[in-house]
Image (spheres, rainbow, N blue to C red):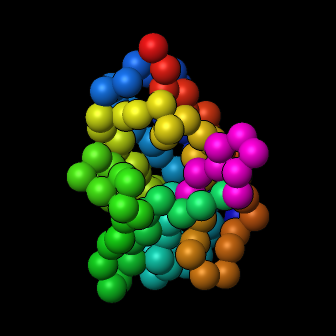
C-alpha cells in the first residue's frame, strides 16, 4: 500500500491550502477505515489534527473552525481544507489510518509565514 500526500506549499498567514492524500490500496480497506490527518513540526512529535470515519469526525481544538476534513471513498482520497492558516500550522502533513497504520507516506510540507 502506498500513501501519497500533496497540496502543500508556502502561504501567508490567513491564507488557505487544500491537501490531498491518495491511498493506493487494492482492497476496500480505505473505505471502511477511520482516516486521519497528522502533522509534525520540527522538534515536535507527530500529532493528529483531524480524523474521519463511520462514527463521525473530530478535530483538535486549535484547528476547529479553520480546517475541514473530507473524503472520497470511490477515489481512495482524503482531503484537508485549511483556511485562516497561522504560522503555528507550519509542519509536514501526513495522512494515515487511525488504527492499524499503513506505512507512512512522504508527507507534504506546509509553511505559513509572511
The image position of residue 95, as x and y in percent, is 57, 57
> Depth check: 73 or 93 in front?
93
Placement of 45 over or under 83, stated as above or below: below
State the residue lying farthest toward the bottom.
55
> Depth check: 51 or 49 in front?
49
The image position of residue 61, as x and y in percent, is 36, 61
The part of the chain drawn in magenta is 38-45
> Depth check: 97 or 46 in front?
46
The image position of residue 40, as x and y in percent, is 65, 49
Q: Is residue 10 left or right of residue 70?
A: right
The image position of residue 76, as x and y in percent, is 47, 61
State the residue lying farthest toward the top.
114
Give the residue at x 60% y 81%.
99
The answer to whether any part of residue 19 appears in the image is: yes
Q: Is residue 50 left or right of residue 21?
A: left
The answer to whether any part of residue 28 appears in the image is: no
Placement of 53 over or under 6, stated as above or below: below
Q: Is residue 20 left or right of residue 1?
A: left
Tell me which corner region of the image, top left, top right, bottom left or bottom right, holds residue 29.
Answer: bottom right
- Assign the magenta stretch its main secondary structure: loop
Amino acid at each position: 500500500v502506498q500513501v501519497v500526500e500533496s497540496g502543500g506549499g508556502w502561504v501567508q498567514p490567513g491564507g488557505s491550502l487544500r491537501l490531498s492524500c491518495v491511498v493506493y490500496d487494492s482492497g476496500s480497506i480505505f473505505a471502511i477505515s477511520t482516516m486521519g490527518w497528522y502533522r509534525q513540526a520540527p522538534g515536535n512529535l507527530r500529532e493528529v489534527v483531524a480524523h474521519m470515519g463511520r462514527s463521525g469526525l473530530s478535530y483538535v481544538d486549535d484547528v476547529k473552525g479553520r480546517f475541514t476534513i473530507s473524503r472520497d471513498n470511490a477515489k481512495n482520497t482524503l482531503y484537508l481544507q485549511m483556511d485562516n492558516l497561522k504560522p503555528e500550522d507550519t509542519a509536514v502533513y501526513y495522512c494515515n489510518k487511525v488504527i492499524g497504520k499503513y506505512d507512512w507516506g512522504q508527507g507534504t510540507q506546509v509553511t505559513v509565514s509572511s
